[in-house]
Image: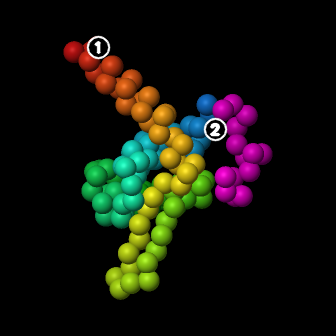
Amino acid sequence: MNEQKTNKELPSCPVETTLTLIGDKWKVLILRDLMPGTKRFGELKKSIGSVTQKVLTAQLRDMEESGLVNRKVYAEVPPRVEYSLTELGQSLKPILDAMSSWGEEYKAASK
């Protein structure tokens, strides 16, 4: 994990720790969209939908600081920036899969 988030700053409860890192609606959607592979900022904004550029930028920076997302800047004009999940970010796949399954079951049960 990134040095900026030490164990002293994280809650003692593991569930609360997870929520601290990915508890925001946008962060979960960013994770969902980066699971298949690398995306550029514009692709993420388009796939997520109603998120503002400012909020998406802030969420990506926070996730990068937490060690969940990699940001790669290419020395081109105009600059090209790509985002991908780190190994730590990829380790959240079972959690997202469980959330997806639960959501499908809930939708089916509430019909």
Q: Is residue 59 magenta?
A: no
Magenta: main secondary structure equals: loop
Who's the residue at 75% across and 45% down the image? 7
Give x and y (percent) for residue 76.
39, 84
First-in-chain label (2 vs 1): 2
The percent coordinates of residue 2 (x first, y second) are: 67, 57
Residue where numbered disc 1 is placed: 109
The residue that appears at 34% across and 57% down in the rendered structure is 44
Name the one closer to the observer, 81 or 50.
81
Q: Nearer the viewer, residue 24 or 82?
A: 82
Q: Amino acid at mark 2?
A: Thr
Mark number displayed over residue 17: 2
Q: Are marks 2 and 1 in contact (CB under 8 Å)?
A: no
Residue under the point 28% across and 52% down: 47
Residue at the outermost bottom position: 77
Instruction: Tell me where the magenta segment starts and ends, as one range.
Output: 1-14
Front residue (pair 97, 45): 97
Q: Quadrant of the C terminus?
A: top left
Taking 102 as reference, is 73 above or below it? below
Give the x, y percent position of residue 14. 66, 32
Q: Quadrant of residue 101?
A: top left
Horizontal side of residue 103 vs 68, given as left or right = left
The secondary structure type at the circle numbered 2 is: helix
Query: Is residue 52 among the parts visible in the rendering?
Result: no
Three-letter amino acid code at the position of disc 1: Ala
Query: Which class describes the residues within 10 Å of circle 1: few (<14), some (14-19), or many (20+)?
Result: few
- SS state under label 1: helix
Q: CA distance from mark 2 to mark 1?
A: 30 Å
